[in-house]
Image (tube, rainbow, N blue to C red):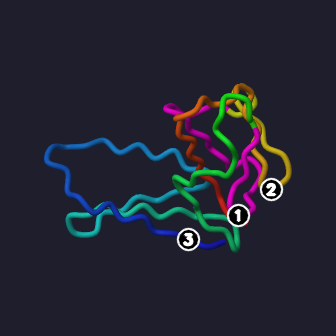
Amino acid sequence: MMSEVIKILHKPIAPVKIVVKPLVPTKIIRVGNSLVVQVTTVEGGALVYNETPTGAVNGSNATFLSEFDFVPGSVEVFIAIKLKPLEDYNTSGNRTITLYLSPLPGENILINYIKL
């Protein structure tokens, strides 16, 4: 197992509740005025955030590819909101994401996943 650390750089003005919905076990610690999120990932993996997958956004294409191979079951897809796996999209292999509804031109698709 390996760990990744995400440092929150801005100190909140008021008390803030941080909700972390990890794909794997997580530990949040305070270091001075910063919160540090330590995420344990699969061996050799790294967390990929806010990647724009490749594929035409044209209202008819529904298949998109990640830049790197991903751990099956670790993918999160966002088009304005977080999509639900098996209800809104499915994955096949280690790079292919198939949406059940094709995104319209101008819509932004972002994905998060654990990289193999």
Label 3 or label 1, whichever lies nearer to me, is: 1
Asked whether 111 falls inside the magenta stretch, the response is: no
Asked whether 73 falls inside the magenta stretch, the response is: yes
The residue labelled by disc 3 is 3
Query: What distance separates the C-alpha of mark 2 from that of mark 1?
Result: 8 Å
Three-letter amino acid code at disc 2? Answer: Asn
**Mark 1 neighbour class, 10 Å CA radius: few under 14, some 14 to 19, many 20 or more:** some
**What residue occupies the far right of the structure in this picture?**
93
Residue shown at 79% from the left, 43% from the top: 91
Residue shown at 20% from the left, 64% from the top: 33
Region rendered in magenta: 63-84
Residue shown at 26% from the left, 63% from the top: 34
Is residue 64 or residue 95 the one in the foreground?
64
Three-letter amino acid code at disc 1? Answer: Phe
| First of labels 3, 2 by sequence position | 3
Three-letter amino acid code at disc 3? Answer: Ser
| First of labels 2, 1 by sequence position | 1
Query: What distance separates the C-alpha of mark 3 from that of mark 1?
Result: 19 Å
Is residue 87 or residue 22 the one in the foreground?
87
| Residue 23 on image: x %, y % | 61, 50
Q: Which mark is residue 68?
A: 1
Position of residue 30 relative to residue 108, above or below, is: below
Is residue 105 or residue 96 the one in the foreground?
105
